[in-house]
């Protein structure tokens, strides 16, 4: 059904040749209804604070079509678990157009779970309520933590039956981000030897996201540098907070360094360098400890795809600086978490001992960091009690506190414990999206009760606040949570 249009949209991607996309109409779900609407995010675009109704609702549900604003599925490729796959693209999502925020910045409006496209391969083009809830919660958790991410305007459920490991109900997510362009877009045109399209894509990315690059001696190299820097910031943030993406294929890597395509992700409970949230990742390619090296691998793949535009030695020189950049940013984030402003001899050993201790005891990472930031309020015992070997924990904590005594403020005075801990509580969250909390919300939602989603969003938007009435949301996972399996269908 065609409609008079209720939104102000632009659609720069339609200016690309047909090789970049296919025009596809959404395939509506049966009896769609709102699960939740991100009113705070919606206001940034001048949209209603409450779930839309009328024509706007029906358009966002994919039930009304605009001839003026056709929706499209992007074509791209990518390396999946290290193997190049040319047969990729938006297999269940459609780019509806672009919304401008209050600052004039354009954001893609994307409908995920909108049905079959030419790139669906053997898939059904659908998303289920479970995976849609996980992406919505995951992206809002990242926003609250200050980590670059895509977002969602809202999601809706339906009566359409979709089969995954079992029969579930279909749902759709209204995703927003400044771009859906991935590393895999460049790989597609490189491996197809369509270097004119590769150059066009790079030129448009420069125009849209880094226009200052046009005034440099090597615009395409500057483009690559920006992508590396954004990726480094994202990876350092993941490692500092204890987040594992689960499927770091090159088609899941945003050129803007935003956490993208939430699937079998996980925030660590007990610290484990080998943590693998993806039940389907049998080799541990995308484990927590592998993320920095996989990001480098992916950037190398992108650099190779850009080689018709950038000289090889310049690509290699940028990649050689990756590890140094990542180490510096990660170190800065960890110093903030530990309340350290100076770089002193012995700090590396202090950090290494901490991570080894956490890994050896599988100590809850979030609780540990938060407890360190509450030494001024609760003393040492809550930190020490997190470890089986309390003597080792006390030994490290004593060394840490002695190190803190060397912290000097701008007036040459020792930074007090109160001041340090207050600052630490601004970067060490009390609340994270533990898998079991997401599962409880999913279980309730599948029974038609969406209240737990709203509660989690309230906490995750302000994860550093105390929220004293919700202390039970910091509880460690119950025994049944050990049976939760998160796979690529999640």
Image (cartoon, grey):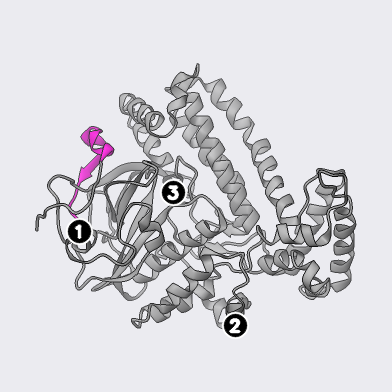
Q: Nearer the viewer, mark 2 or mark 1?
A: 1
Give the Cα distance between marks 3 and 1.
Answer: 27 Å
Q: Which residues are magenta?
A: 11-26
Q: Earlier in the sequence, mark 3 or mark 1?
A: 1
Give the Cα distance between marks 2 and 1.
Answer: 43 Å
Q: 208 and 297: which one is in front?
A: 208
Q: Residue at x 33, y 68 (%)?
A: 128
Place of residue 188 in the rendered image (x, y in percent of width and height, measured from the top left): 35, 36
Quadrant holding the N terminus: bottom left
Q: Which residue is mark 3?
A: 252
Residue 336 in the figure: left or right of residue 65: right
Place of residue 124 in the rendered image (x, y in percent of width and height, measured from the top left): 26, 61
* Other residues around mark 2 within 10 Å, as few (<14) / some (14–19) / many (≥20): few
Q: Residue at x 37, y 26 (%)?
A: 203
Q: Which residue is mark 2?
A: 479
Residue 147 versus residue 447 in the image, above or below = above
Q: Secondary structure at mark 2?
A: helix
Q: Which residue is mark 1?
A: 59
């Amino acid at each position: 059904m065609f409609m008079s249009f209720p939104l102000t949209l632009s659609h720069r991607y339609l200016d690309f040749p047909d090789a970049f996309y296919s025009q596809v109409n959404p395939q509506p779900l049966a009896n769609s209804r709102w699960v939740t609407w991100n009113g705070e995010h919606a206001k940034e675009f001048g949209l209603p604070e409450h779930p839309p109704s009328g024509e706007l609702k029906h358009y966002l549900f994919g039930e009304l079509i605009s001839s003026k604003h056709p929706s499209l599925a992007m074509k791209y490729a990518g390396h999946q678990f290290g193997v190049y796959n040319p047969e990729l693209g938006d297999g269940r999502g459609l780019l509806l157009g672009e919304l401008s925020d209050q600052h004039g910045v354009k954001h893609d409006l994307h409908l995920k779970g909108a049905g079959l496209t030419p790139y669906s391969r053997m898939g059904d083009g659908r998303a289920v309520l479970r995976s849609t809830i996980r992406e919505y919660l995951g992206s809002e958790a990242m926003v609250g933590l200050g980590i670059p991410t895509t977002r969602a305007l809202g999601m809706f459920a339906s009566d359409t039956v979709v089969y995954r490991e079992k029969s579930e109900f279909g749902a759709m997510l209204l995703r927003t981000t400044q771009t859906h362009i991935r590393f895999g877009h460049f790989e597609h045109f490189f491996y197809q030897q369509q270097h004119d399209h590769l150059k066009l894509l790079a030129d448009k990315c420069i125009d849209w996201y880094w226009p200052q690059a046009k005034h440099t001696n090597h615009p395409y190299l500057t483009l690559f540098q920006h992508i590396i820097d954004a990726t480094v910031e994202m990876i350092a943030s993941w490692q500092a907070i204890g987040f594992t993406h689960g499927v770091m294929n090159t088609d899941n890597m945003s050129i803007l360094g935003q956490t993208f395509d939430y699937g079998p992700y996980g925030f660590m409970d007990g610290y484990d360098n080998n943590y693998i949230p993806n039940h389907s990742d049998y080799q541990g390619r995308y484990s927590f400890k592998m993320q920095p090296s996989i990001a480098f691998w992916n950037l190398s793949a992108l650099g190779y795809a850009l080689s018709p535009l950038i000289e090889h030695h310049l690509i290699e020189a940028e990649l050689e600086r990756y590890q140094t950049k990542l180490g510096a940013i990660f170190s800065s984030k960890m110093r903030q978490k530990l309340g350290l402003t100076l770089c002193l001899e012995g700090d590396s050993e202090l950090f290494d001992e901490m991570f080894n201790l956490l890994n050896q005891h599988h100590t809850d990472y979030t609780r540990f960091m938060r407890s360190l930031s509450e030494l001024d309020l609760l003393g040492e015992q809550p930190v020490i009690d997190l470890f089986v070997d309390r003597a080792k924990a006390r030994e490290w904590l004593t060394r840490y506190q002695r190190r803190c005594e060397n912290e000097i403020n701008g007036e040459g005075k020792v930074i007090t414990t109160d001041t340090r801990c207050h600052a630490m509580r601004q970067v060490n969250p009390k609340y994270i999206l533990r898998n079991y909390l997401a599962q409880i919300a999913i279980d309730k939602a599948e029974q038609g009760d969406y209240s737990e989603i709203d509660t989690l969003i309230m906490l995750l938007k302000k994860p550093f606040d105390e929220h004293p009435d919700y202390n039970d949301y910091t509880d460690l996972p119950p025994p049944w949570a050990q049976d939760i399996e998160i796979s690529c269908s999640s």
